[in-house]
Image (cartoon, helix red, strand yellow):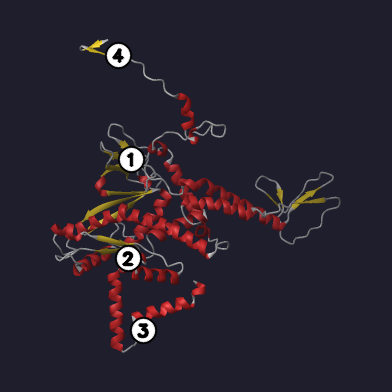
Amino acid sequence: MKFFGLNITRTKPPKPQTKYIALRNYDAAKNSDLLFNYNGGNSSADALLSGNLSKIRNRSRDLARNNEYVKKFKRMVSSNIIGPNGIALQNKAKNKNGGQDKKTNDIIETAWWKWGEKGNCDVTGKYSFRALCSAIAANVCIDGEVLVRKIKTSDGLKLQLIEADHLPEHFNDTHKNIKMGIEFDAYGKPIAYHIAKFHPSDLISTAQNEYVRIPSDEIIHVFLPDRISQTRGVPWVHAAVTKLKMINGYEEAELVAARLSAAKGGFYISPAAEDYIGDDTADNGDPIQEVTPGMLEKLPAGWDFKPFDPNHPTTAFAEFEKAVLRGIASGLDVSYAYLTNDLESYNFSSIRAGVLDEREAWMNLQSWFIEEFLNDVYKEWLKMALLTKAVPFALNRFDDLCAPFWMPRRWAWVDPQKDITANILALKAGLKAPSQVASEMGYDLEEVYEAIKRDQDMRESMGIQTASDAELLLLLANINKGDGKNG
């Protein structure tokens, strides 16, 4: 065949080597007898959430109200991400020489601290900034997401907490590119949120709820996505909801059965099929008799008694419950021992390993919270503080002044002697800096040195003699050497 004067030879493509394809398949994709009805589905993240999100959220809230483990988990999230004192700010603005501008930073930190007091940062006046952050963390894990609106006022920045119910997952508009209440641009970036004026189930809500279109630069949508294309947040307890509900029912049944077993009730049997008259009557008219421990009663002539002995709790109850709760703890990504307060079967080494792993997870969530919420709020607050002169510097210095360094809560060492010794050795070997050690403990090195200097001046002014730093280190080394058997 000639094509533009060239001789072209048409050849048949080689046949595919189909006989080897089956050997290269994933086992998880095989249609075996065990997996023939296992279809994971190929839906998008939003398609899976649409229509199901409110049900998952409501069930999570019910567990948070009525299940002691979820209530504990909610408290653990707030306590470990935010902590009792909140996530502290250390501003790190520099002077012209490249060093820390301490005076400027102190002014900014003082203004931030005043803004964070109760009644200043929240539009309702109910929250301090620490309490507001705790509320966000506690509600994100149960609801899956929290909306925070940034409101600019003459007094500066104000924040408004909005529950996820105000963002309707059923509100979709293909022409306006609105998915689950959020309006996107062509690249998938949120440009507006359509927020319901009233809670759908509030006492003052109406049948025709009003929706307010709020630009995205006024909204912080706090959630932790599971998938890349996910638009809305899923409650963190979703993977454990079924087991949590079942363990609730199982514990209740065992508790009732154990109480009945302790009472040792039974049934009266009449040979003449006479009607039994109890002490009281149930709602449906059946006669009942209250069972009291230690109660003895004389039977009528000819009557027999058939005991009811449920034999509970069973000996397998404790181990079975532990197995289920370990799975629940894994679904919540927390330690079983701390979720259930069960420390009887743990030794020091296993607890330490579990605690360190769990703390890594908490620190990861702390970083997420800082990136997702704190940095955004701080930048908006600083701009407004410069405009309202709450921070007495020019607005054109914003880029130089905005240098937040966040200090989340840290935890006490599991074995203080070993950890302190390890840090001393790391400092001597040059593997760690003092600022790094202080940061791991939740302190700012500058503040630590200032406190040490104040204490030293106070001791000297009062004529108090104490051991020097070198003497303290030598004493610690001797203690470690003498107690080596305990190390």
Structural distance between the alpha carbons of marks 4 and 1: 59 Å
Residue 48: x percent and y percent? 42, 37
- The correct choice, above or below, for 384 with respect to 145 in the image is below
Q: Nearer the viewer, residue 100 or 52?
A: 100
**Which residue matches tag 1?**
181
* Quadrant of res 4: top left
Question: Does label 4 or label 1 sit earlier along the sequence?
Answer: 4
- Disc assigned to residue 436: 2
Question: Label 3, label 4: how many angstroms apart (C-alpha)?
Answer: 96 Å
**Badge 2 or badge 1: first in the primary sequence:** 1
Q: Are marks 4 and 1 in contact (CB under 8 Å)?
A: no
Query: Mark 4 and mark 3 in contact (Cβ < 8 Å)?
Result: no
Residue 132 horizontal/vertical position (percent)? 34, 58
Q: Nearer the viewer, mark 2 or mark 4?
A: 4
Q: Nearer the viewer, mark 3 or mark 1?
A: 3
**Which residue has dot 4 on it?**
9
**First of labels 3, 1 by sequence position:** 1
Q: Residue at x 28, y 48 (%)?
A: 219
Find the distance from the CA under tag 3 to the CA under tag 1. Answer: 65 Å
Q: Of the residues shown, which amino acid type is indicated by label 3?
A: Ala
The reply to whether callout 3 and callout 2 are in contact (CB within 8 Å) is: no
Circle 1 crowding by C-alpha within 10 Å: few under 14, some 14–19, many from 20: many
Q: Is residue 128 among the parts visible in the rendering?
A: no
Q: Are marks 2 and 1 in contact (CB under 8 Å)?
A: no
Residue beneath label 3, please?
467
The residues bearing labels 2 and 4 have C-alpha atoms spaced at a distance of: 72 Å
